[in-house]
Image (cartoon, rainbow, N blue to C red):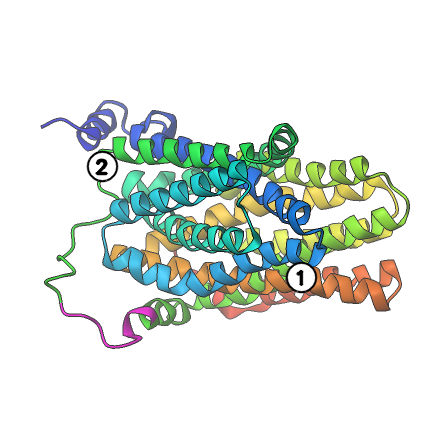
């Protein structure tokens, strides 16, 4: 029987190396489907608070939409890892796309019919957030089943580029569609999930190693399945140290961008130029994703992490000094440029050392630890800017990065990392 694995093996025999990732049919199907769904989600993320504000006139209720999504996503992160490791990943991802497709199609229909209220919107946001957490966890876990080990870093870097690209393209498109018709961004998002679902159905390769039917295998003790991922992460000195670094680092970047946005607006910068600042930072990340594999090949992961942390601390401090002008975005863009290389190397290492049956749980633990503090960053930035002078308040975020850099430099867990994919 011929198939993708056989074709890859033939290419290895002929050339001595695996085929280019651009020739990996199944990975490209998944990647393309997620490009489309990421853009659709970015459109909806912009349009949802606009819709709530238009319906209620309340900024508080508009902000509640985003908060609800973050709370649901955080609550679902660890259970998602258990589901991804216990059940068939392809079926889970298909189910997630069906749920999101139905939710946003229903919202679009309700908007057209004039029946979209805050309650329905919150239900759609909660369902979409829960399904997205399960889907992204399954996608992370499936990468090593779709690409050879020495291409995992490149695959993760391409996924990083996809995320930054969609964050640049989605919001302007969502704003344009919302202006043309309030239902259009949600209809477009539903269509993006339909295309993602179609791509998934065309993937031939299994997304996990063979495992027993969950209906025939004994159920784990209560809470035991979820704790396995946590025990694995805490038992690996490198991963254990890394989550201590990632939490303040991600919080600092999110808080810094938010604080800069408010500070620039306070200084009288027009909203369109404030938007350009955000776009500049996103472009830095997108370019960094394309260069991530080359950076990762030249620097060992522990060195790369330390370099990124110290560079980010210096660049963010420079950005604070320039915080009254649009040029303040340039140092932040350079700092963000370095991030995808670390993410690609990290998840390449994680995929290489984690058994397939634990991939989902380990990924969910890492993502939860790395991003949970991020939700607090806008609130922290708001409190600081309210009670402390602008530049002094913003210095809190470079100091957070200095703390992360110190751990990256002196942690025995980081320095003792013995395997790099």
Q: Residue 307: percent from the left, percent from the top?
A: 62, 52
Residue 222 among those drawn in magenta: yes
Instruction: Name the residue beneath numbered marker 2.
Output: 205
Q: Residue 278: percent from the left, percent from the top?
A: 71, 41
- Earlier along the polypeptide chain: callout 2 or callout 1? 2
- Residue at image position (62%, 44%) is 51
Q: To which quarter of the image does residue 192 belong?
A: top left
Sort mark 1 into few (<14), some (14-19) or many (20+) by Cα contacts within 10 Å: many
Sort mark 2 into few (<14), some (14-19) or many (20+) by Cα contacts within 10 Å: some
Alpha carbons under labels 2 and 1: distance apart: 40 Å
Give the secondary structure at mark 1.
Answer: helix
Using the rendered image of the protein, determine whether residue 390 is visible from the camera's viewpoint. Answer: yes
| Quadrant position of the N terminus in the picture | top left
Residue 401 drawn above or below residue 28: below
Task: Please tell me the numbered disc located at residue 168.
Answer: none
Residue 358 drawn above or below residue 285: below
Give the secondary structure at mark 2.
Answer: loop
Using the rendered image of the protein, determine whether residue 294 is visible from the camera's viewpoint. Answer: no
- Residue at image position (31%, 62%) is 82
- Residue at image position (73%, 59%) is 398
- Residue at image position (57%, 63%) is 247
Residue 147 among those drawn in magenta: no
Q: Residue 170: percent from the left, percent from the top?
A: 58, 35
Please tell me which residue lies in front, 146 or 33: 33
Q: Residue 287: percent from the left, percent from the top?
A: 60, 34
Range covered by the magenta-colored residues: 218-226
Please tell me which residue lies in front, 122 or 2: 122
- Numbered disc in front, either 2 or 1: 1
Asked whether, in this view, residue 130 is left or right of residue 331, the answer is: left
Task: Please tell me the numbered disc located at residue 377.
Answer: 1
């Amino acid at each position: 029987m011929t198939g993708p694995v056989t074709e890859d093996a033939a290419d290895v025999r002929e050339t001595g190396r695996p085929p280019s990732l651009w020739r990996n049919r199944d990975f490209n199907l998944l990647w393309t489907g997620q490009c489309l769904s990421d853009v659709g989600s970015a459109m909806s993320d912009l349009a949802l608070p606009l819709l709530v504000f238009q319906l209620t006139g309340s900024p508080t209720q508009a902000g509640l939409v985003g908060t609800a999504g973050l709370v649901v996503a955080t609550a679902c992160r660890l259970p998602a890892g258990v589901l991804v490791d216990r059940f068939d990943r392809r079926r889970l991802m298909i189910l997630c796309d069906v749920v999101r497709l139905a939710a946003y199609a229903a919202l679009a229909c309700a908007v057209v019919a004039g029946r979209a209220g805050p309650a329905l919107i919150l239900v759609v946001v909660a369902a979409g957030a829960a399904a997205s957490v399960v889907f992204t966890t399954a996608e992370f876990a499936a990468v090593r089943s779709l690409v050879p080990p020495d291409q995992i870093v490149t695959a993760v870097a391409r996924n990083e580029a996809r995320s930054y690209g969609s964050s640049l393209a989605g919001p302007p498109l969502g704003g344009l569609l919302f202006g043309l018709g309030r239902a259009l961004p949600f209809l477009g998002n539903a269509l993006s999930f339909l295309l993602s679902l179609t791509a998934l159905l065309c993937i031939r390769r299994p997304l996990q190693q063979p495992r027993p039917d969950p209906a025939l295998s004994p159920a784990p003790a209560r809470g035991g399945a979820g704790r396995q991922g946590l025990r694995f992460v805490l038992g690996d000195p490198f991963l254990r140290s890394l989550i201590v670094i990632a939490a303040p680092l991600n919080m600092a970047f999110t808080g810094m961008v938010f604080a800069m946005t408010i500070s620039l607006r306070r200084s009288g910068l027009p909203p369109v130029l404030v938007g350009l600042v955000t776009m500049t930072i996103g472009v830095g990340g997108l370019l960094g994703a394309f260069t991530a594999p080359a950076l990762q090949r030249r620097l060992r992961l522990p060195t790369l992490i330390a370099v990124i942390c110290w560079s980010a601390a210096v660049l963010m401090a420079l950005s604070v000094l320039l915080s009254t002008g649009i040029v303040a975005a340039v140092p932040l863009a350079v700092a963000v440029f370095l991030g995808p290389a670390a993410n690609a190397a990290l998840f390449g290492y994680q995929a290489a050392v984690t058994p397939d049956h634990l991939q989902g749980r380990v990924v969910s633990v890492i993502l939860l630890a790395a991003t949970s503090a991020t939700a607090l960053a806008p609130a922290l930035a708001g409190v600081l800017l309210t009670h402390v002078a602008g530049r002094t308040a913003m210095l809190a975020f470079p100091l957070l990065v200095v703390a992360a850099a110190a751990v990256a430099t002196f942690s025995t867990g980081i320095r003792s990392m013995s395997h790099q994919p």
